[in-house]
C-alpha cells in the first residue's frame, strides 16, 4: 500500500482498530478549509504587483520570494501539488533558497509522486529532502518526514529506522517520532521493541499536564500496548 507523505507532525501513528494495512495515510494535512480561496487570491495579487516592480528594481525580489514561498505552502496545505511546486520553484528563483522551501518542495513532489506513481517525482522529492538537510541538518520535521519517505517509498527500512532513533534520542518530547518508531518496529515484525517504546512513551505522557491532544496520545498509546500484548500472548 502506498501512503501519502504529508507534512503535519500532529498525526498519531497508532495500530488499534486497523487491519494489516493500518492507516491509509501516515499524516494528515491541515484542513483544506483553513486555506481559503481569498488567501490564495490575495497572495497571487501581491505576486503580480511585485512581478511588475521587480523588472524595474531588484530590491523587490526578496518580497516576491517570500510571497511565492507562502503561496507554495498554502497550495501544499490544499493538496494542490502542481501550483505548489511552481510557486516554490519561483521562490527559489527570487532568492529564497532555504531549507524550508526545499522541504516544502520535497513534500509536494513526494505526494504528487504517490498520486501519479511517478518515479521522477520521487527522485525529485529525495533531492529536495537531501538539500533541506544539507542546509539545516537538525531540521526536525524534515528528518521525521524523510525517514517515513525512505521507509515507505524507498524501502530503506534500516536507514529510516536509524534516522528516527537518532531523532527520538535528540528530541524525546517529539512524540510523533516515538509513535512512528514504534510502528516501524511493529511492521518489521519486532513487537517487543515496539511494545517497549510504547510503554516508555506512555509513562512519559502520564507525567504531562492534561490536554485534549495529550489525552488522545495516551489513549492511542494505551490501545497500542494492549493490542501488542494480546498478540504476544496469542490472544489475537
Image (cartoon, rainbow, N blue to C red):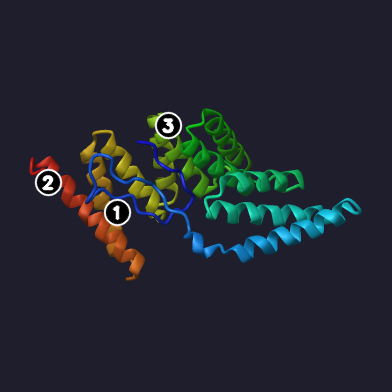
Q: Earlier in the sequence, mark 3 or mark 1?
A: 3
Q: Residue furthest right?
A: 56
Q: Quadrant of the C terminus?
A: top left
Q: Secondary structure at mark 1?
A: helix
Q: Secondary structure at mark 2?
A: helix
In percent of width and height, residue 50 lies at 81, 57
Q: Which of the 4 quarters of the picture holds residue 137?
A: top right
Q: Position of residue 41 (x, y in %)?
A: 67, 62
The CA distance from mark 1 to mark 2 is: 19 Å
| Residue, disc 1 | 201
Locate residue 147 relative to residue 16 in the image: left or right.
Answer: right
Nearest to the observer: residue 139 or residue 115: 115
Asked if 175 appears above or below 157 in the picture, the reply is below
In-image side of 204 versus 53 (left or right)? left
Give the vertical position of 104 relative to 127 (above or below): below
Q: Which residue is mark 2?
A: 230
Q: CA distance from mark 3 to mark 2?
A: 30 Å
Residue 209 location, quadrant: bottom left
Picture coordinates of residue 108 (x, y %)? Answer: 55, 44
Which residue shows up at 34% across the image and 43% down it? 181
Residue 99 visible in this rendered orientation of the protein: no
User: Label 3, on which residue?
Assistant: 159
Which residue: 40% across, 40% down? 3
- Residue 10's spot in the image, x, y percent? 42, 57
Dots 3, 1 in contact, CB < 8 A: no
Cα distance in 3D space between marks 3 and 1: 22 Å
- Residue 46's disc is none
Amino acid at each position: 500500500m502506498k501512503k501519502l507523505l504529508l507534512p503535519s507532525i500532529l498525526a498519531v501513528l497508532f495500530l488499534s482498530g486497523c487491519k494489516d494495512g493500518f492507516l491509509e495515510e501516515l499524516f494528515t494535512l491541515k484542513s483544506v478549509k483553513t486555506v481559503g480561496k481569498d488567501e490564495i487570491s490575495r497572495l497571487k495579487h501581491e505576486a503580480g504587483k511585485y512581478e511588475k516592480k521587480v523588472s524595474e528594481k531588484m530590491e523587490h525580489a526578496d518580497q516576491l520570494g517570500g510571497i511565492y514561498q507562502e503561496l507554495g505552502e498554502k497550495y501544499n496545505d490544499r493538496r494542490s501539488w502542481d501550483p505548489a511546486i511552481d510557486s516554490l520553484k519561483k521562490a527559489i528563483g527570487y532568492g529564497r533558497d532555504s531549507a524550508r522551501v526545499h522541504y516544502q518542495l520535497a513534500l509536494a513532489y513526494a505526494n504528487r509522486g504517490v498520486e501519479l506513481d511517478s518515479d521522477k517525482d520521487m527522485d525529485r522529492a529525495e533531492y529536495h529532502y537531501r538539500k533541506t538537510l544539507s542546509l539545516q541538518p537538525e531540521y526536525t520535521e524534515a528528518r521525521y518526514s524523510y525517514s517515513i519517505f525512505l521507509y515507505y517509498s524507498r524501502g530503506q527500512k534500516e536507514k529510516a529506522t536509524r534516522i528516527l532513533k537518532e531523532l527520538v534520542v535528540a528530541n524525546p518530547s517529539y512524540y510523533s517520532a516515538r509513535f512512528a518508531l514504534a510502528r516501524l518496529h511493529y511492521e518489521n515484525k519486532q513487537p517487543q521493541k515496539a511494545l517497549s517504546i510504547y510503554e516508555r512513551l506512555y509513562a512519559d505522557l502520564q507525567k504531562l499536564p492534561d490536554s485534549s491532544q495529550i489525552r488522545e496520545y495516551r489513549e492511542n498509546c494505551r490501545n497500542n500496548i494492549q493490542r501488542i500484548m494480546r498478540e504476544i500472548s496469542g490472544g489475537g
